[in-house]
Amino acid sequence: MSDKQLDLDKHRGMAEQKATDIRRILADVENNAKDLRDRQGILENQLLSAPAASWPEAAAKARYVLNLYAAGMGEQWYDAIHAGGSA
């Protein structure tokens, strides 16, 4: 058996190579999204574990929660606020 690695992608057609690349990129995106959700969970547990020790810390916690809320409302909320309407 040879120790030389085979590059199987070069034996495939262009469409198959692109499909493989897309699957690899999609797997990377899904793994990164899972890592982000895990880190976000850890951060939220730390934010909730103790009250803020100072006003700047309280403001940072409030900003985080407001950003989560705003992200959940979507573009419709953003458009309504910036058009002078109400959400």
Image (cartoon, helix red, strand yellow):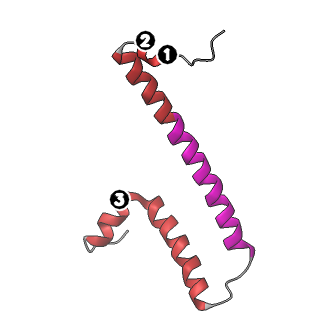
Q: 29 or 13: nearer the eye? A: 13
Q: Residue at x 37, y 13 (%)?
A: 13
Q: Residue furthest bottom?
A: 55
- Confirm or deny contact between disc 1 and disc 2 (CB under 8 A): yes
- The three-letter amino acid code for the residue at tag 3 is Glu
User: Are there few (<14), some (14-19), or many (20+) residues within 10 Å of tag 3?
Assistant: few
Q: Which mark is residue 70?
A: none
Residue 36 is inside the magenta segment:
yes
Return the residue at label 2. Answer: 11
Q: Residue furthest right?
A: 49
- Confirm or deny contact between disc 3 and disc 1 (CB under 8 A): no
Q: 12 or 73: nearer the eye? A: 12
Rendered location of residue 30, percent (x, y): 54, 40
Which is more N-terminal, label 2 or label 3? 2
- Mark 1, secondary structure of its residue: helix
Rendered location of residue 2, percent (x, y): 63, 12
User: Are there few (<14), some (14-19), or many (20+) residues within 10 Å of tag 2?
Assistant: few
Which span is picked out in magenta? 27-49
Q: Is 55 on the left or on the right of 85, as rendered?
A: right
- Mark 3, secondary structure of its residue: helix
Residue 18's quadrant in the figure?
top left
Return the residue at label 3. Answer: 75
Return the residue at label 1. Answer: 8
- The three-letter amino acid code for the residue at tag 1 is Leu
Q: Rounded to the nearest whole Å, what is the CA distance between mark 3 and mark 1? A: 44 Å
